[in-house]
Amino acid sequence: MDNSFTHILCVKVWSPHLQMTSNYGNILSIVKNKIVDITMHFVSETGGESLNWRINQFEKPYDEMFAGDLVGNISLHFENKIYELTKELLKNIEDSLKAENKLSNGEIILFTIVKNIT
């Protein structure tokens, strides 16, 4: 398994109407493609840093173990910043998709970030 990442981003679209996650209209791929197109830059005490998520295809059997396939290689010193930047990015994507009528007003993008401990 390729361990050249520090974090895994798990993303789902929640539909309150269905009371479950949804991939209607292939919306999850649309969200993921918008995520990987963006590199976020921020300033830290040590200088300029960047955060970008990339899609990683896990090999069998590891593909069964992870809830997400977006990974990043990010310094552990910036975990709060990673969370805040990712939250802001996904809210912007959610708003954009609602404006394009690709998400209904009730649907929301949920996420969690998991550390790779290997």
Image: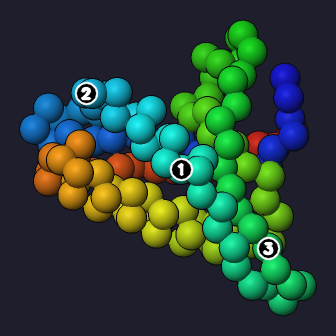
SS assignment at label 3: strand
Residue holding disc 2: 24
Residue 101 in the image, given as x and y percentages of width and height: 18, 47
Kind of residue at disc 3 = Glu
Residue holding disc 1: 35
Query: Residue at position x 17%, y 35% from top?
Result: 19
Query: Residue at position x 61%, y 17% from top?
Result: 64
Label 2 crowd bin: few (<14), some (14–19), many (20+), radius 10 Å:
few
Residue 112 in the image, given as x and y percentages of width and height: 52, 50
Specify the quadrant that holds the N terminus: top right
Residue holding disc 3: 49
How many numbered discs? Answer: 3
Kind of residue at disc 2 = Tyr
**Looking at the image, can residue 8 be seen?**
no
SS assignment at label 1: helix
Residue 59 found in image quarter? top right
Kind of residue at disc 1 = Ile
